[in-house]
Amino acid sequence: MNESTSWDALRQLRLGGKKPTLPLIVTTQRYLPRKLEGVGCMVIVHQAGSVMPIKLLEALDVIFMFDRCDLAASVCRMAQEKNVVFGSVNVWCKCASMLNTQPYTCESYASMVDWSERQHAT
């Protein structure tokens, strides 16, 4: 069963020495928990602009699904600055409609597509 929850619920789970067994999805998309119902993962709907308790994500498998692709890159930079190491991290790129293991900006994705198309045209 899907559990849409809050940062406080994750905090309580971590204080109890536990962690989610499936990847934790952190999203700004309020409709996502309904779409993932029955998957069995924990989904936190993060309020854009509010402080993210990044240390709670230490050693967790995390999927970031934000409204803007550049937000995942910002969160990953923040984690690195605070020495938070994820178990694994995946980032949904809304623009490219794909899941990536590295966050990047959509501008860099567009450049990559342009480069690839030029390589195949020659």
Image (cartoon, grey):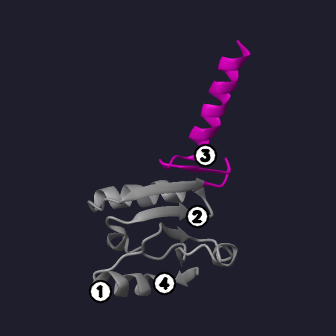
Who comes first in sequence, dot 2 or dot 1? Answer: 1
Mark whose residue sits in front, 4 or 2: 4
- Determine whether 49 is above or below 121 in the image: below
Viewer-proximal residue among 103 and 48: 103
Give, as a three-letter code, the residue at label 1: Gly
Numbered circle sitting on residue 6: 4
Residue shown at 56%/82% (left/top)? 4
User: How far, Cα to Cα, is label 1 from label 4?
Assistant: 16 Å
- Would you call the spot at circle 3 few (<14 residues within 10 Å), some (14-19), or many (20 or more)? some
Is 118 in the magenta? Answer: yes
Start-end of magenta stretch: 93-122
The spot of residue 116 in percent (x, y) is 64, 26
Who comes first in sequence, dot 1 or dot 4? Answer: 4
Count of marks overlaid on the render? 4
**What secondary structure is marked by label 2?**
loop
User: How far, Cα to Cα, is label 1 from label 3?
Assistant: 39 Å
User: How far, Cα to Cα, is label 4 from label 2?
Assistant: 16 Å
Residue where numbered disc 1 is placed = 16
Who comes first in sequence, dot 2 or dot 3? Answer: 2
Residue where numbered disc 2 is placed = 66
Who comes first in sequence, dot 4 or dot 3? Answer: 4
Numbered circle sitting on residue 106: 3
Contact, mark 4 vs mark 3 (Cβ under 8 Å): no
Give, as a three-letter code, the residue at label 4: Ser
Numbered circle sitting on residue 107: none
